[in-house]
């Protein structure tokens, strides 16, 4: 049987929110079978739980935000990406402010935290969303065209293409395909950092965004070049970060997908629209389990360690 997974023990981190600039403490805890991933705002007089779901996404400006009534948790996608990459089904996330800490701007620190806590198999079958037909969402046309698509596939793979028309970005890889069954998430994807442009910083900060951003937790570019002294971690780090984000956004559906994702210039908003379109077409998918690991897609049948 392909089993659900949680953590063996708790683990914690302290950092700042990328957009809020607030100091925040994060505690990742084991959770029981079937609970899913739940964010708990422990800084409030009465703690509030926010279970992960596509419908709980209420803001997608430069990040994915989950809400339960007026209570929010911002920038969940990097932690969710790490959970997707390592196959975590059930976890409680205690958070002391409204935004997940950005740490180094990638998912690598979350991968390290999850592996430090240890991953434990639970005595219950893991449920997958298996696609039966393609679902697609589009926005704009011509130079403003964006789209994202999910198609049936026996496993989980992603293909992303970017087009930023910026010298520093254009000189790197513009398209990446990653298959979770044959690649190493932690080595190939997780270290890719978020990125931004100095020309946008003043506008973002005027709108209460990027208040905690800097060279230690993002790739920063002026009009011509990367400003980080250590350069890029991958030759195609920009598009790999878009893959990282997409994995986190898609995992907000609450189950691992058996599907192929492809996108052109997509982002958090379009990724969430894609999930909502999928859920609305109830004949496009079904929930499945695997009593025999040999019948399951290879990447879903075992734990994969990064190092």
Image (cartoon, rainbow, N blue to C red):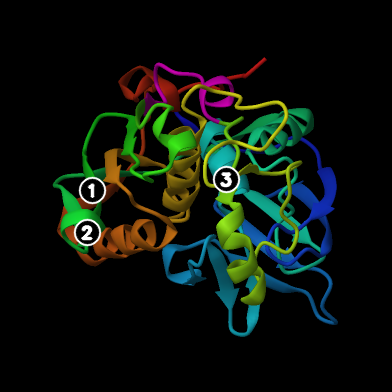
Check if mark 1's residue and mark 3's residue have beta carbons within 8 Å: no
Q: Which residue is depicted at the point 81% across and 69% down?
A: 42
Residue 183 location, x and y as percent?
Answer: 44, 18
Residue at disc 3, secondary structure: strand
Q: Nearer the viewer, residue 243 or 120?
A: 243
Location of the N terminus (image quadrant): top left
Start-end of magenta stretch: 178-189
Which-is-in-front pick, marks 1 and 3?
A: 3
Residue 57 belongs to the span the image colors magenta:
no
Check if mark 1's residue and mark 2's residue have beta carbons within 8 Å: yes
Res. 137 mark: 2
Give neighbour class at mark 1: few <14, some 14-19, many 20+ (Cα, 10 Å).
Answer: many
Tell me the quarter of the picture where residue 9 sits.
top right
Q: Nearer the viewer, residue 170 or 50?
A: 170
Extreme residue in the bottom direction: 70
Location of the C terminus (image quadrant): top right
Cα gap from disc 3 to disc 2, whole angstroms? 25 Å
Q: Which residue is mark 1?
A: 149
Relative to 169, 31 lies left or right: right
């Amino acid at each position: 049987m392909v089993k659900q997974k949680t953590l063996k023990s708790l683990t914690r981190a302290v950092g700042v929110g990328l957009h809020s600039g607030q100091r925040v403490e994060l505690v990742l805890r084991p959770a029981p079978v079937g609970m899913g991933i739940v964010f708990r705002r422990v800084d409030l007089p009465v703690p509030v739980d926010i279970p992960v779901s596509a419908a709980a996404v209420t803001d997608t400006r430069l990040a994915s935000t989950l809400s339960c009534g007026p209570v929010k948790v911002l920038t969940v996608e990097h932690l969710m990406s790490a959970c997707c990459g390592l196959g975590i089904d059930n976890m409680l996330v205690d958070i002391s402010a409204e935004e997940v800490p950005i740490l180094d701007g990638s998912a690598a620190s979350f991968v390290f935290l999850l592996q430090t806590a240890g991953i434990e198999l639970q005595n219950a079958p893991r449920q997958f969303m298996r696609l039966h037909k393609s679902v697609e969402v589009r926005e704009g046309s011509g130079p403003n065209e964006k789209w994202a698509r999910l198609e049936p596939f026996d496993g989980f793979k992603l293909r992303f293409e970017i087009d930023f028309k910026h010298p520093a970005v254009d000189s790197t890889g513009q398209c990446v395909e990653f298959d979770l069954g044959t690649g190493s998430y932690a080595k190939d994807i997780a270290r890719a950092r978020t990125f931004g442009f100095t020309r946008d910083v003043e506008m973002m900060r005027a709108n209460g965004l990027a208040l905690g951003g800097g060279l230690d937790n993002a790739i920063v570019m002026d009009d011509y070049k990367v400003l980080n002294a250590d350069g890029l971690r991958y030759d195609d780090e920009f598009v790999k970060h878009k893959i990282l984000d997409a994995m986190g956004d898609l995992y907000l559906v609450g189950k691992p997908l058996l599907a192929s994702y492809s996108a052109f210039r997509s982002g958090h908003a379009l990724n969430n629209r894609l999930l909502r379109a999928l859920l609305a077409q109830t004949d496009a998918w079904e929930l499945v389990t695997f009593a025999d690991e040999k019948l399951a897609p290879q990447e879903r049948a075992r734990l994969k360690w990064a190092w």
